[in-house]
Amino acid sequence: MASLFKQISAVTSMNVRSIPQRAAMSIASVVAVALAISVLLFFLALGHGLSQTVQGSGANDVAIVLRDGAGAELNSVVTRDQLNIIAQAPGVVRRGQAPIISGELLVIVDGNKRSTNTNANMPFRGIGPEGLSLRHNVHIVQGRMFRPGTNEIVVGAGLLREFSGFEFGRTIRLRGTTWQVVGVFEAPGTVFDSELWADVAVTQSLFNRPNVYQTMRVQMTSPAAVQTLKRFVHDDPRLQLQVLSEREYYAQQASQSTGQFTIIAWFLGVVMAIGALAGALNTMYASVAARSAEIATLRIIGFSGYAAFFGTMVEALMLSALGGVLGLVISFIAFNGRSTSTLSSGFTQLVFRFELSPGIIVSAIIVAVIIGLFGGFLPGIRAARVRPQLELAAQ
Amino acid sequence: MTDLIRLTDVEKTYTRGKEKIAIFERLSMRIEQGDFLALMGPSGSGKTTLLNLLGGTDRATRGTIEFDGKRIDKLSEGQLTNWRAQNVGFIFQFYNLMPILTAAQNVELPLLLTNLSPKKRRENVATALNIVGLSDRARHKPREMSGGQQQRVAIARAIVADPKLLLCDEPTGDLDRTTADEVLGTLQLLNRDLGKTIVMVTHDAAAAKFAKRTLHLDKGHFVASELAA
């Protein structure tokens, strides 16, 4: 067994050290694997970043109330009467006598996408006085919060990065009304980072939606209290509404949007991996052919077929692993952490970052290793079958 | 002298499509320990096939092949590989050195099949290179050496594991006369001083003169035998 390891080590060392003699094919093989891995990582990072952003927006102890059957905020309607009933429900946190709730209205306004200089839909959200406190980890980083009852807006930092026209201090016109941008807030890793916020009463008035909300956010005393609110709403015939914790709501949204990216990622990843595999097979067959006299010589000397097989396998794995690492490096440089935007389920732009998680990196490495294993297996068998005959050694 | 190799009624046939091509039919021969035998004959006479059979790199279709009194035609592929590693050194026409390895690393290759320690392997490599007069070239790669030097490295590789039998396939076919004679002189020395049994295939009558005897093959039969003068 020790001898076999020495043989494998010697053959592998010779194979690897002779790679420069087959540089062009080896580089092509490495690049093919790197491209396959990069494409796979691109879509997985896209899906993961989107998923993290959407899911990261939700708290367990904040309930979101929508019209029963409404899949998203834009389809929902909550009346002022319903809002007032829920404000009295058990488990709602109060500040003094006032419940911490926020009736909200989401409308769509036009923005200008910096990268393409084209119009895009921006989410413009009217929030109640408690709207800010209901969102954890949201901070004003420039200027101040809007004053209730005024035409003032604050803008998410993510939206500012991707879209122009909402810079701090600017006066803008939306639907025939003038608004002043008085602050910038940061809500990193959440959907709120790509929204514009204003006072809900002003929004209702200026967008001609009096007394109507689309959703309602309610600060509950605990995650369990969300269940209590669900029962409360279910038992009251006046409330044809559904209650979800924020986390449930955004998890639902995330599964719809990121599922498609994951399917695309794996479909394209597998197609490209098959291409890379063909390249790896080609390279390794060429490598075995180029070394057939060497392999025959080693077999004549007394080296086993296993050594020839594993030597070829290790060479394929190394080339593939190198391609995988190159793919990872390309991904980290080209897009990891970069901000982008996409159309969310609410038909508005959602800003998020590409995010390579450890799980995604491990998946990519596994794919690279699989390409190497399959790419080396058949050529390895061919190498092992090289007959130890003098005629072959003389070629 | 005792026989090192004995072939009895050996047949070797190849199948090409439906056609069977017989290389040897009932070939028998004996090679004594310490012999230096040159095999000559026209192309296609079966010289290299015979060398493959003697070295266990090919199998006879029928008949028996004994080495040092033991039948090698019965060995499995793995056993035959091990037997080759322990008992046979090969010398090729085009040297067949690994271009990426130094002379010393090339010579060490057969020792990787043994249980010798790295220190002992280095000692044996140094001894083998010393025998062929290339101690000063241990760290050189094949491309940095002449054809004659490369063939002497190949000889060092063939003898480093101390095999009883050396099989040489046209060992001077790629060398000029002077260099060829030096290489053949080295083989003669290994035969005379170290007692190695050598079987050498050659087209070169001058090379055959370095052997103790010459057998002429034609169409799978020995047609003539000569002893050295």
Image (cartoon, coloured by chain):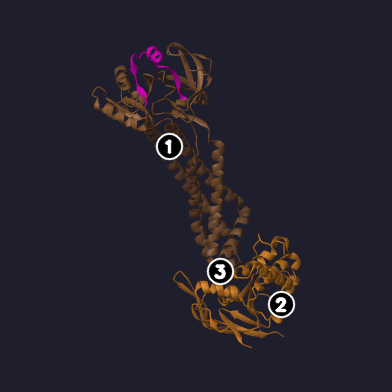
Chain colours: A brown, B orange
Rate crowding at label 3 as few (under 14), some (14 to 19) or many (20 or more) other CA atoms within 10 Å. many
Give the foreground label among 3 and 1.
1
Q: Residues within 10 Å of mark 1 (few under 14, many from 20)?
A: many
Q: Furthest-bottom residue in view?
A: B1
Q: Nearer the viewer, mark 1 or mark 2?
A: 1
Q: In this view of the protein, which residue sits in the foreground, A86 or A391?
A: A86
Q: Which residue is mark 2?
A: B206
Chain for disc number 1: A
The residue under label 3 is A388
Q: Amino acid at mark 2?
A: Ala
Q: Position of residue A304 (x, y in %)?
A: 54, 67
User: Would you identify the image quadrant in which residue B134 lies?
Assistant: bottom right
Q: Is residue A203 magenta?
A: yes
Question: Percent from the top left, x then y, of residue B167?
Answer: 63, 75
Chain on which label 2 sits: B
Calculate the distance from the C-alpha at mark 1 to the C-alpha at mark 2: 76 Å
Q: Amino acid at mark 1?
A: Phe
Evaluate if marks 1 and 2 touch, with contact meaning CB atoms under 8 Å apart: no
Mark 1 lies on residue: A261
**How many numbered discs sit on the rendered protein?**
3
Q: Nearer the viewer, residue A166 or A24?
A: A166
Q: Which residues are magenta?
A: A194-219
Query: From this viewpoint, which residue is outermost toward the front?
Result: A96
Q: Secondary structure at mark 2?
A: helix
